[in-house]
Amino acid sequence: MAKLSFQFSALFILALGLMLGGCNKKPPTSTDPGKKSSATGVAFGKKKPNGEEGGFKVEKFKGQPAGPNLVFIEGGRHILGSFEENVEMTASDNIENTVTIKSFYMDETEIANIHWLEYMHYLLQDSSQQAYEESLPDTTVWSAELAYNDPYVDHYLRYPGFRYFPVVGVSWKQASDYSLWRTSMVNNGLAMKSGKKEVKELAKNGERIPLESGVVLPGYRLPTEAEWEYAAKGLIGTQYLDEAQDYARLYPWDGHSLRNPYGKQMGQFLANFKRGRGDYAGIAGALNDGAMITTWIYSYPPNDFGLYNMAGNVNEWVWDIYRPGSFEDFGAEPNGDLNPIRRNDFLDKSEDYDFENFETLINNHVRVYKGGSWKDVAYWLSPGTRRYIEEDSSTSHIGFRCAMIRADSDN
C-alpha cells in the first residue's frame, strides 16, 4: 500500500512538473524570438545545421527606438471633420466620417529655424550646391508693400533670437525633402551608436542600413491629414469601458472657449492667432496671446498627447492632396476608412476640375494644410477645418512637423 502511495505521489509530482513546465514556456515574440525557429526547429545563428556558414541570424531587437522629438500617439477610432458651420463656404468639404488611425509618432513641436539651419549646414557640406540652394526658405514671404516687415526678411530665419520659432517660407516639397534627410541623419546616428561593426561600416560608407538590423527607424515624413487631425484633437482619456466618447472637441483642448479656464493662467489665450481685424496680440501692458507673429514652439500648454501648438502659431503641411470630398470618399473605398490618405486623384480625377481656365484652383499639385496660424482668425484653429495651396508655394504662416509609423505594433 505504501508502495502504491509512493508511485501515485511520484506520478502526481511528474504530471504537475510537466504542467507547470508547459505553462512556463513562453511563446516567441519580436523582442524574444528564442534560440531556434518555431517553424523548422533549426537554431538561429551564423551556421547552417551542417556546420557551414550561411545560417539565418536573428538580430537582437528591443523594440522600435525612440526618435528625437517624437511623441507616441495611440491610435483608435476617430470622427474626421468638423461640426462647426463655415459661413464663408457654400459647400462643406469636411463632412464628418468615422475612420480608424493606427498608432504612430508625431513631433511634439513644429520644426524650428534652428532645425532648418542645421539641415542647410549639412547640405552645404555633403550635397551639391543645387541641393543647398533648393533648401533655402523664401524669406521674402514676410515682405509687404504697405507694411514695414522688412526686418523679418533679414532676421527671422538666422537671428539667434528666433532659433526656436517655427520655420516658415518652406514649400511642401521642401518639407518632404527635409523629412528624407532627417531620416538619414537619425538612422546614421543610431547605427554609429549600435555597437554593431557591420552596421557602423554601412553608415560610414553611406550605404543602406537593413531594416532587419533592428537598429534603424522607419522614415520621418509628413503626417497624413487624418493623422494630423486625430493627433490635434487629442481625445485620449475621454472614453470609458463602453467606448463611448461623451463629447467632441472644437479645439485641441476642452470647452468652446479660446481662453484658459484654470489657475494662474485663467483668461489667457491657449493659442497664437489673430483676434480680430488689425489685432494680432492685444494691448500693450497686457498682451494676451503674447505674439504678433509666430512664437516659441513650446508656447502654450500641450494637448493631451503632449503636442504643442496644434492650433495657432503656424499652419502645417500634411501629406494629402486636396479634394473637397475626401472625407466622404474614404468610406467608399474598401479599407479606405483605415489609415485614410488622399495621395492622388483616385475617385476624383484632375480632369474633372477646370484648372486651365481658372474655374478652380484644384489640381493634383495642391496640398492640404491645417491648424490655423498667427494671422488666422479663430475659426481655422479647429482641427477639422482644411485649406489647400500649391505644393511648391511658401508663406509666412505655413510650417510643418514630421510623423512616423509605429512599426512594432498591431494597433
Image: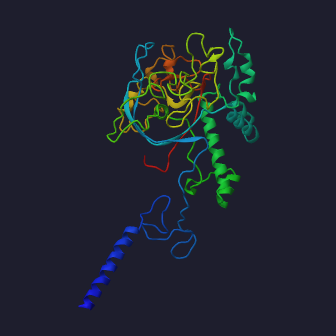
Pick whichever, 41 or 161, lies toward us. 161
Residue that extends furthest to the top in the rendered view of this protein: 146
User: Where residue 221 sits: x, y (%)?
Assistant: 56, 38
- Give residue 8's quadrant in the image: bottom left
Pick whichever, 109 or 47, lies toward us. 109
Is residue 332 found left or right of 229 in the rendered image?
left
User: Where residue 342 sits: x, y (%)?
Assistant: 46, 31
Q: Is residue 336 visible?
A: no
Is residue 336 found left or right of 322 in the rendered image?
left
- Give residue 160's quadrant in the image: top right
User: Where residue 61 sits: x, y (%)?
Assistant: 54, 58
The structure residue drawn at horizontal position 58% and vertical position 34%, both measured from the top left corner, is: 401
The structure residue drawn at horizontal position 74% and vertical position 23%, both measured from the top left corner, is: 155
Total labels drawn: 0
Q: How is the image coloured?
A: rainbow
Pick whichever, 128 or 171, lies toward us. 171
Is residue 97 found left or right of 321 in the rendered image?
left
User: Where residue 98 sits: x, y (%)?
Assistant: 36, 32
Quarter containing the N terminus? bottom left
The structure residue drawn at horizontal position 34% and vertical position 42%, both measured from the top left corner, is: 241
Above or below, 57 relative to 286: below
